[in-house]
Image (cartoon, coloured by chain):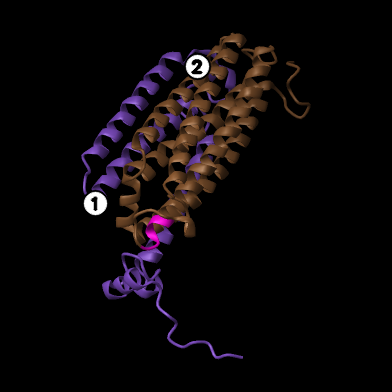
Chain colours: A purple, B brown
Amino acid sequence: MSDHTSAAATAAHSHAGRYLVVWAALMALTALTWGLSTIHIPGLAGVAVALAIAMVKGTLVALFFMHLWDQPGPNRLVLVTSLVFVAVLVTLPLLDNATRFPLANPPDAETAPQRIRDAILNEGPPAPAHAPAHP
Amino acid sequence: MHSAVAHHFESLEKQGQAQRLGMWLFLATEVLLFTALFAAYGVYRYLYTGAFSQASRGLETWMGGVNTFVLVTSSFTVAMGLDAIVKGKNKRTGLLFGLSILLGCTFMVLKGFEYRHHFLHAELPGPFYGGPIAGSGGSMFFALYFLITGLHAFHVLIGMTVLGVIGARTWLGKYDAEHHVPVELAGLYWHLVDLIWIFVFPLLYLI
């Protein structure tokens, strides 16, 4: 971090070398995550590895291409605050669906009881138990 | 005092900080816009785990991968464009922004070929899904695929427009080493588009 009070001070010196290093790192990490996907890490570990690499790449872009490294506190706080809400928005709906009574999820979801799932996948949606009375 | 300073700002520096803060607030709303789609992706991936990985394996990974390299490189050329104007080289910034727009075009063309492939194979959302996956999983995957990549492609188009306008104005000498915040903000928007794709690529193509 350099001088907080002066925008000119942060921009006065060249960042070309820094950009080049970050670009090389981003290209290498893209190749790495692509390569790792071809060996099919099973289950959640594969998801975790892919997301961890994406987060490292995202951090590099935000800190150096987007200059948060040189920015005063308030500008950094804006992005950090939005990331807190990203975490809330992604995890809470997931926890909701994961902790529901299975039949409260879509009937052909892979979390539904196998018997119901088989019936739907083989025979189409079930007819309603009670046909609505004709008015 | 520099002519670009609005009357309610004391100095160019203070105006620049206010402009950056405003841009970051806007970018935060953009992040949350995409987060809504990522949350939907998370929920449906949990409900249709097998179908989603099957559908994901059916995508042309090389196209997503090449597009990632293209966008990352375009972010680099935009960053170098800012570096040029900081040194007062306005023509170089114009050229680098033009190069970034060309890379954006490359991204869109590849994306177009990819969409064409999906349309020809009936890999479409909702009732139009005619692919091999039984149940709702396949059509849900492609509903989210088209929503996420479509919204992102829309942002690429806006970003290319912004780079075009600001790049042209820089070429014409409207900005200089002292007054370059608009160039920086155009770059911020483009980097955000890159940042979103960095997460879209593994979520849709790799896992």
Q: Is residue A85 visible?
A: no
Q: Position of residue B132 (x, y in %)?
A: 34, 55
**Closest to the observer, A12 or A51:** A51
A135 in the magenta segment: no
Q: Is residue B106 visible?
A: yes
Q: Left or right: A57 with respect to B15?
A: left
Residue B80: which disc? 2
Q: Which residues are magenta?
A: B135-139
Q: Secondary structure at mark 1?
A: helix
Res A88 quadrant in image: bottom left
**Mark 1 falls within which chain?**
A
**Mark 2 falls within which chain?**
B
**Closest to the observer, B56 or A95:** B56
Quadrant holding the N terminus of chain B: top right
**Closest to the observer, B50 or B24:** B50
Q: Amino acid at mark 2?
A: Met
Instruction: Compute the Cα span from label 2 to label 1.
Output: 40 Å
Residue position for label 1:
A43
Residue B153: which disc? none
B138 in the magenta segment: yes
